Image (spheres, helix red, strand yellow):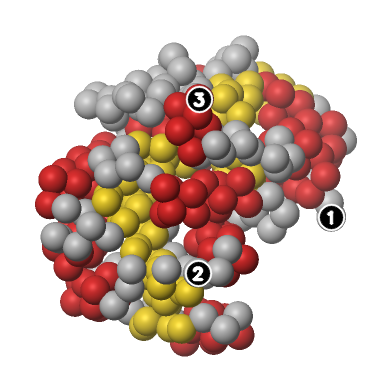
Amino acid sequence: MKVFVTGATGWVGSAVIQELLDAGHEILGLARSEDGADTLRQRGIAVHRGDLSDLDVLAAGARACDGVIHTAFIHDFKDFNAAGETDRRAIEAMGEAMAGSGKPLITTSGSALLPHGRVGTENDAPDPAGPAQHRTASEQLTLALAARDVRSTLVRLPPSVHGDGDYGFAPRLVDIARAKGVSAYIGEGNNRWPAVHRFDAARLYRLVLEHGTAGARYHAIGEQGVATREIAEVIGKGLGVPIVSLAAEEALEHFGFLARFFGADCPASSAQTREQLGWQPAGQGLIEDLAQHYLRD
């Protein structure tokens, strides 16, 4: 297929591109800057200039290709709602361009949207009272497009999509521990984070592109739930700093905006995804990855 990929130079999107190329697919990559465009050209990838606010550009990219993988998102921690609305409108524009075509449209969401305190599954809808409502409308729109003859599907990513070169949540925890001189967890540290290796997630996107069912939700969950205390312990040991528990009221000062995420108990399952698509994560687990890649000087 010729596949339009948004977020083509991002952490997940760049891995998706490599997975698609290795499988023989052709890529049209969205690039919002000339530096991003150059990066894509160096990999032999056709460039489509624009960003998530350029709705006509997004629609044109979707029309020009046999399918779309949408991994781009504006990670604006100061205004989640605006970022979510930009995402929804982008999906709307691409979906409208693909209506009646039967082409695959894969959008990206997060497992942390699901109700906390229990293992989330592919069948679960986002928690209406949860903290991540900025992506709920995008989920609903994606699933609704299946009724318009778009093979629309969701891939939910966990809070930690890890691997060498990561610049997401896990390295921020390492940076905080270095700066504060302690590696902390909240309360007893029993709350759980699901995780997946970046290359395992990329392989799932390809499988969904090739074999996904319209209107389905898929979970890119390699590990159902890693206790945050275990994460803090491997960071503390690796950096040689004390490992401490913080009360909930101390977490915001210590972790900043990350306290909201690091304090969540949001385990998730990918049992149905594995059964339906034959997806088997093979990459390192989060703890092993932290010890090997994240704690180097």
Local secondary structure at mark 2: loop
Can you identify the residue that label 3 sits on?
A: 271
Comparing labels 1 and 2, the label whose residue is closer to the camera: 2
Can you identify the residue that label 1 sits on?
A: 297
Q: Is residue 77 above or below residue 1?
A: above
Kind of residue at badge 2: His
Tell me which label, 1 or 2, sits earlier in the chain: 2
Badge 1: how crowded within 10 Å, few (<14), some, or many (20+)? Answer: few
The x and y percentages for residue 268 are 48, 25
Q: Are marks 2 and 3 in contact (CB under 8 Å)?
A: no
The x and y percentages for residue 74 are 37, 59
Which residue: 83% across, 45% down? Answer: 292
Which residue: 33% across, 42% down? Answer: 213
**Residue 290 location, quadrant:** top right
Q: Disc 2 and disc 3: Cα gap in Å?
A: 27 Å
Badge 2: how crowded within 10 Å, few (<14), some, or many (20+)? Answer: some
Judge whether residue 15 can be spotted in this image: yes
Q: How many marks?
A: 3
Q: Is residue 165 above or below residue 126?
A: below
Which of 99/126 is in front? 99
